[in-house]
Amino acid sequence: MQALKTVVITGANKGIGFGILENLIQKQSYKIIMACRSLELAQKSRTKLIEKYNISQDRIDTIELDISNSDSIDKFIQEFTTRFHQADILINNAAVAVKSDDFNLEVVQFTFKPNFYGTIELTEKFIPLLTQNGKIITVGSSAGKTKYLKSDDLVKRFKNPNITREDVFKLAEEFQEHVKNNTYEQNGWPSWGYGISKLLINTYVKTLAQNAEVKNKSLQVYTCCPGWVKTDMAGDEAELTIDQGALTPVYLVELPHEVNPDYQGQFFYLQKVEEL
Ligand code: NDP
């Protein structure tokens, strides 16, 4: 029997993360580590699946992880290293979206912490724990597209094929500065912290393809949109079920473990590459 591939999914206790977990667990070739900020919620979801599919306890494990907190990320890395040593795939699924229409620096920072900064901190600290030919799959969003920007200059900067990690961080800082000074509109930004957090993370994944360790290890890096999915984040009016929302991330999990230049660093929607 082939060895199981180890997949880490952040925010796997509910929503799309749980959908990806449920899909993969039925395929018999994966062991999943649920990286969740509430171990209690993670355990409940784990028990539900173990009973539903009558699978062995060690197919699903849990580790505490709050991607908004650097200490928690470090603790997670330490615990993961001790217990599991390495993984084949990291799925960055966890994120937040505030429900109210409030738009101010506080909302933007609250959103950027997990969706952008925390996701990147975890990703970069986890790279050494990925196997050769491993994958990093990020659940971005179609909300993170350049069509929502109202400045040609910003669009040009985000679409620059040679954009660097530093450029992406600079754009993140600029947005926050313009929100703080209430000059975001004249600078072409929308009043949408979540959308910009997703545009930044989608764009970061492009730069991740150029990361020296990613190249050395031939890691495949992708970002994607699951579609508009009925979850606590999107609500009941969304069009897709959680099972359907899991399909594009799972498609990326199942792509061959080899770097395809047409796919590397790209954004996927409905299992196809799309421009940001
Ligand atoms: P949910 O709100 O249903 O689930 C989000 C998950 O992320 C929960 O498990 C939550 O944990 C976890 N999470 C949030 N913050 C943190 C944190 N700081 N540390 C660790 N875990 C955290 O959202 P969805 O399932 O809808 O979203 C999943 C992904 O899909 C997100 O990246 C989202 O942006 C993206 N997406 C969703 C769409 C949709 O229509 N639903 C559309 C496009 C993209 P807890 O239970 O503890 O809150």
Image: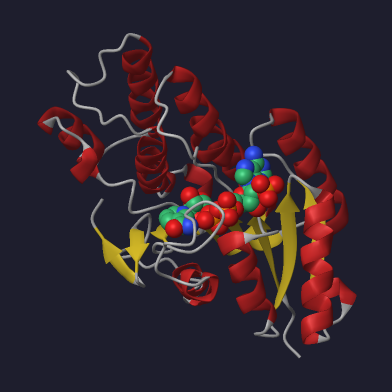
The answer to whether 155 is drawn above or below residue 188 in the figure is below
Residue at (42%, 62%) from the top-left corner? 237
Residue at (33%, 54%) from the top-left corner? 142
Of residue 164 and residue 159, the one placed in the foreground of this image is 159
Corner quadrant of residue 78: top right
Residue 2, horizontal then vertical, whole percent: 72, 86
Residue 229: in sight, yes or no?
Answer: yes
Residue 125: in sight, yes or no?
Answer: no
Residue at (19%, 30%) from the top-left corner? 154
Residue 219, horizontal then vertical, whole percent: 51, 58
Apparent side of residue 233 relative to residue 7 in the rendered image (left or right): left
Which residue appears farthest toward the bottom when viewing the image? Answer: 1
Corner quadrant of residue 274: bottom left
Residue at (67%, 84%) from the top-left corner? 26
Specify the quadrant that holds the N terminus: bottom right
Number of disc labels: 0
Of residue 126 and residue 9, the one placed in the foreground of this image is 9
Residue 44, horizontal then vertical, whole percent: 82, 63
The answer to whether 83 is drawn above or below residue 95 in the figure is below
Apparent side of residue 182 relative to residue 151 in the rendered image (left or right): right
The answer to whether 36 is drawn above or below residue 89 in the figure is above
Residue 115, horizontal then vertical, whole percent: 51, 40
Apparent side of residue 24 relative to residue 104 in the rendered image (left or right): right
Which residue appears farthest toward the left when viewing the image? Answer: 152
